[in-house]
Amino acid sequence: MFENLGDRLQNALNKIKGYGKISEDNIGEVTREIRLALLEADVNYKVVKEFINNVKEKALGEEVKKSLKPGEVFVKIVKDELVDLLGKEDEPLIVVKPMTIVMMAGLQGSGKTTTAGKLALLTRKKHGLKPLLVACDVYRPAAIDQLKQLGKELNIEVYSEGKGNPVEIAKNAVEYAKNQGYNYVIIDTAGRLHIDEPLMEELQNINEIVKPNEILLVVDSMTGQDAVNVITGFNEKLPLTGAILTKLDGDTKGGAALSIRHLTNIPIKFIGVSEKMDGLEAFYPERMANRILDMGDLMGMIEKAEDLMDDEEALKAAEKMQKGKFDLEDFLTQLNQIKKLGPLENIIKMLPGAKKMGLNNVNIDPKQMAHIEAIVLSMTPKERRNPDILKASRKRRIAKGSGTSVEEVNRLLKQFDQMKQMMKKINSGNFKMPF
């Protein structure tokens, strides 16, 4: 996501960081590179022109002249303009009592049905709501079956009347939700290969009958600049409250995300970051700007950990670390907690300066994690609690049981011992940062 754009912008900005002052000449060279980077990322040319003009105007203004470090101020100006472009403030979901009705719209192939399932899961987990999925895509073959399968996987009910009238189905579903105590209704509507009148008329009729609180347009980010035209076309017929950009984990250039809000005034509320059902993230303009400029996303990382990791287990581990009693059983528990966060390389990318440290292209082989887990699981509970008793014969048995080598067992034990020593230093206050 934004990999190439981020690299190009950072290369351009690095040139200006060492300047003692900012002039029209040296700013011109950097802004030319920024312009090219944005255009190559498929950002709309009108948006690029306005972005560059704003950056130049602010960079040559009073705030830079008064600064002791003009290069840093210039970076901040670029970041602030990026945030402004992406929407300034994040736009949360609309949730009303006693029940919220959401209509999902989008072209065929945008990932609308899957996104409906992801949204249902997210609202249940993060907002404590009781969602109901409604199958109103009666035209696409297997669309209803797909939604039912998702509902089964997520343990979320799907309301369906088969191949009936979508408007009537939506109306009946809302009545059913009221009677059954559901408080978040997600209506999955039909998509088309292009915007057409019959599609719009059907969506307008559903909107008129059920009066949804939220109309979310699902847009495939791979469509690039055409995403703006899709949103504009739908927004002329429907009062859209937000957009969801899917497939941002693919090879998309990212330009759609940088153009949409500015050109359509429709906020991006969520982004699809993986094919997994928990791969839907709230969209935060400032955090996204930080990621693009390699300033990290620590808040995103913390929230991810809070959502997926067990607080009680983490507290127990912290207490054991403080007392110096952290053993391999605790290590195994923490390893399983970390696995919940997804691929480690994705987490590392959220650290500030990850690209600068060469960590943005780190590939951590899942087999390595599996080997570590197999080694620890091949130990007896007594051995996990007391690694010091692991002598040659025990290590050979563990290596054989885990399908690894004695060298790998020794390496893990050495790394574990080093980790424990570091914890002791931190807790004793003798730890010094290595720079």
Image: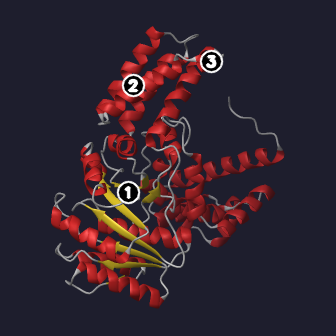
Q: Quadrant of the N terminus?
A: top left
Which of the pair 219/249 is nearer the observer? 219
Which of the pair 389/115 is nearer the observer? 115
Q: Position of residue 352 (x, y in %)?
A: 56, 38
For disc 1, the marked residue is 244
For disc 2, the marked residue is 34
The residue shown at (58%, 23%) is 72
For disc 3, the marked residue is 69
The residue shown at (57%, 10%) is 21
Is 227 rendered above or below residue 312?
above
Q: CA distance from mark 3 to mark 2?
A: 20 Å
Secondary structure of the residue carrying tag 2 is: helix
The residue lying furthest to the bottom in this view is: 179
Q: Sort mark 1 into few (<14), some (14-19) or many (20+) by Cα contacts within 10 Å.
A: many
The amino acid type of the residue labelled 3 equals: Lys
Q: Position of residue 395 (x, y in %)?
A: 57, 60
> In the image, 384: left or right of 347?
right
Secondary structure of the residue carrying tag 3 is: loop
> Nearer the N terminus, badge 3 or badge 2?
2
Which of the pair 144/188 is nearer the observer? 188
> In the image, 5: left or right of 79?
left
Is 311 rendered above or below residue 89?
below
Q: Are marks 1 and 2 in contact (CB under 8 Å)?
A: no
Q: Is residue 393 in view from this perspective?
A: no
Q: Position of residue 83 (x, y in %)?
A: 49, 39
Q: CA distance from mark 3 to mark 1?
A: 38 Å
The numbered disc on residue 262 is none
> Nearer the N terminus, badge 1 or badge 2?
2
Is 77 rendered above or below residue 408?
above
